[in-house]
Amino acid sequence: MPAEEIRKGSARMAPRDTLPSWLRNGDFETTDSAGAPADWNLFREGFFDDDPALARSGVRSVRSSFLYGWYQDMQVPVSPYQTFTLYGFAMREFADERAGARAPFFRADGSFVKDSFGFSPVDAAPGAYGAFWVPLEVPADAHAAQLFLRGESAQAWLRFDDLQLF
């Protein structure tokens, strides 16, 4: 099967590369004036690396702990109970680590609605980048969200690159 085509049974589906992503700077290649990843905010424990040997593509990637290292604020066009999927690539150190995300959702007036959490296995051996998919259900009344990157357990320091949210 060609890499640019996804098949489900005999029906053809849109290639992931052509789906619009709600994330900005999901490859971390654009930096702000301080040299940090543009459109991303550091929260608690996280690192940003400018090293092509550590990136899946390009030269930049981020690492997040289970304490939510990096996040992005988003205005999301939502319908009640639709599901977004965080898709991308992660590198882990240990075989039992999983990539994860947290998405707190907010109403138009800024009040909190609910948190959505998800985890995914990483489709590669430790030390190599592998694909992951984290589904996040959108609650009714949601107008905006934040998206936090994380590992699943206390020892997890996953490296993330080439992320999309669709």
Image: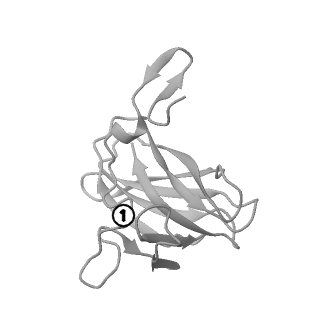
Say if 85 sits above or below 150 in the image: above
**Quadrant of the image containing the N terminus:** top right
Q: Assess disc 1: are there few (<14), some (14-19) or many (≥20) residues with their C-alpha within 10 Å of its C-alpha.
A: some
Q: Nearer the viewer, residue 51 or 158?
A: 51
Residue drawn 44% across and 57% down? 162
Say if 70 sits above or below 8 in the image: below
The answer to whether residue 1 is left or right of residue 138 is: right
Q: Position of residue 112 (x, y in %)?
A: 38, 57
Residue drawn 37% across and 35% down? 80
- Residue type, mark 1 in image: Gln
Question: For the residue labelled by badge 1, is the local secondary structure a helix, a strand or a loop?
Answer: strand
Say if 83 sits above or below 163 in the image: above
Say if 96 sits above or below 137 in the image: below
Q: Position of residue 45 (x, y in %)?
A: 53, 79
Q: Position of residue 116 (x, y in %)?
A: 50, 51
Q: Nearer the viewer, residue 73 or 139?
A: 73
Residue drawn 30% across and 67% down? 39
How many marks do you count on the picture? 1
Residue that label 1 marks? 72
Q: Which residue is situated farthest in the right direction here?
A: 95
**Quadrant of the image containing the C terminus:** top left
Q: Position of residue 91 (x, y in %)?
A: 60, 63
Q: Nearer the viewer, residue 101 or 6?
A: 6
Q: Which residue is situated farthest in the bottom direction here?
A: 34
Residue 156 in which image quadrant: bottom right
The answer to whether residue 96 is left or right of residue 92 is: right
Residue drawn 67% across and 65% down? 127
